[in-house]
Amino acid sequence: MEPLVTIAIPVYKRLDYLPTALQSVAAQTYSNIELIVSDNGLNGQAIPEIIRQHYPKGAVFRQNDSIADPVTHFNQLVAAATGNYFVLLCDDDLLGPGFVAELTMLLEQNPNAAVAVPRWVEVNPAGVELNRQKEYARPPYLSGDAYIRAWCLNEYELRGTTVTHLARTELIRRCGGYAALHRALYTDDSLLAKLALGHEVAIAQLATFYWRVDEKSLGHAGHYREVALACRQYLHFLDTDPYIQAFATAYPARWKQLKGYLREASGEYYYTLWTGQFRNELPYTTWARAAFALPPMWNYYERVLSELLLPRPVYQGVTSLRRRLRQNRFLHRLYQRVKYRSA
């Protein structure tokens, strides 16, 4: 008999995309699915009616009496799941028809694999494709260490696989579930990192996750201070989480290298927002100040300082960061300070 797979959809106030998310679950080629839809936004009977209209197979509906923070809500769904495997599907995203079937098969075939990650496609709010993972000859399984490295360095474009995946439910509970990080930012990364440690990660060849890129989503709507706070909390989590620390104690050299990859990837995420969304939304002085909201990370701050210095006409034709810094005593002192503290 097919193992039971729980797909959990947390809902807050955004109901417009829920019908298509439900339809993508209904279209799965895999039959033994428990669907849990959870209302965390005090929406009354609106969500049960949407379920009735768009998911004919029967779903478990749960509703919080009061609004919980997103991470608490995610962990409530992990606790409520009865399936052998668990998928957290945001209410604006979609699963390809073969998502559950292929990822479950990969984990069933390899008991040491803790989590299976899909291919990804980015779509806009209207559902129109924006970008997709390129075709690569990828191995079906990677060691946890190899996966973390590949994800953080974006080999095979694996960085997009952290959002929605299929994992062993009991292992999610054993490693502590989703970390309590501000506005649920970096929570996907925190869980995936723990699941990978000491295990293997399965890599789908066909199963696809459709990630809706919406500026209103948690990952794109925060003020820079909120994103920076979540990043700092995530870096603290890497140093203090009991499950991770047990691994670090057993394998100190491996963890030192893996933590370096994870730290750099966290800075890369913030840098992407800083050079994109934050630059467009903030006054220049606030935007420049926002660059220094993270703890010392040498690669991150080297790029930040280059970005801040490049636009100035006085530095035209000067390609070396160190040469440009010599032209600005304040930034040179800051550069040396960050370099020293990052060492």
Image: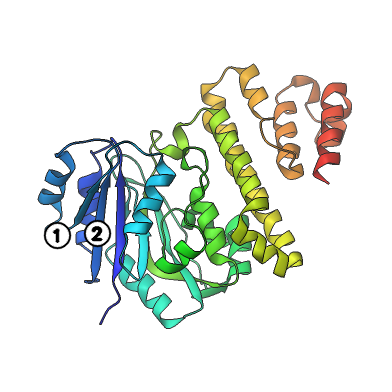
Identity of the amino acid at label 1? Gly
Q: Position of residue 85 (x, y in %)?
A: 36, 68
Q: Position of residue 333 (x, y in %)?
A: 87, 28
Q: Secondary structure at mark 2?
A: strand
156 left or right of 51 in image: right
Packing grade of label 1 (10 A; few <14, some 14-19, many >=20) is: few
Q: Secondary structure at mark 1?
A: loop
Q: Are dots 2 and 1 in contact, CB under 8 Å?
A: yes
Q: Is residue 192 above or below residue 105?
A: above
Residue occupied by mark 1: 58
Q: Nearer the viewer, residue 144 or 214?
A: 144
Camera sees residue 327: yes
Q: Position of residue 68 (x, y in %)?
A: 37, 39
Residue occupied by mark 2: 35
342 left or right of 284 in image: right
Packing grade of label 2 (10 A; few <14, some 14-19, many >=20) is: many
The N terminus sits in image quarter: bottom left
39 left or right of 207 in image: left
Q: Nearer the viewer, residue 186 or 240?
A: 240
Which mark sits nearer the N-terminus, 2 or 1?
2
Q: Residue at x 28, y 40 (%)?
A: 126
Q: CA–CA distance between discs 2 and 1?
A: 8 Å
Q: Is residue 132 above or below residue 205?
A: above
Q: Residue at x 47, y 80 (%)?
A: 111
Q: Position of residue 115 (x, y in %)?
A: 46, 68
287 left or right of 160 in image: right
Q: Quadrant of residue 27?
A: bottom left
Q: Quadrant of residue 40?
A: top left
Q: Is residue 215 above or below residue 342?
A: above
Count up the numbered dots.
2
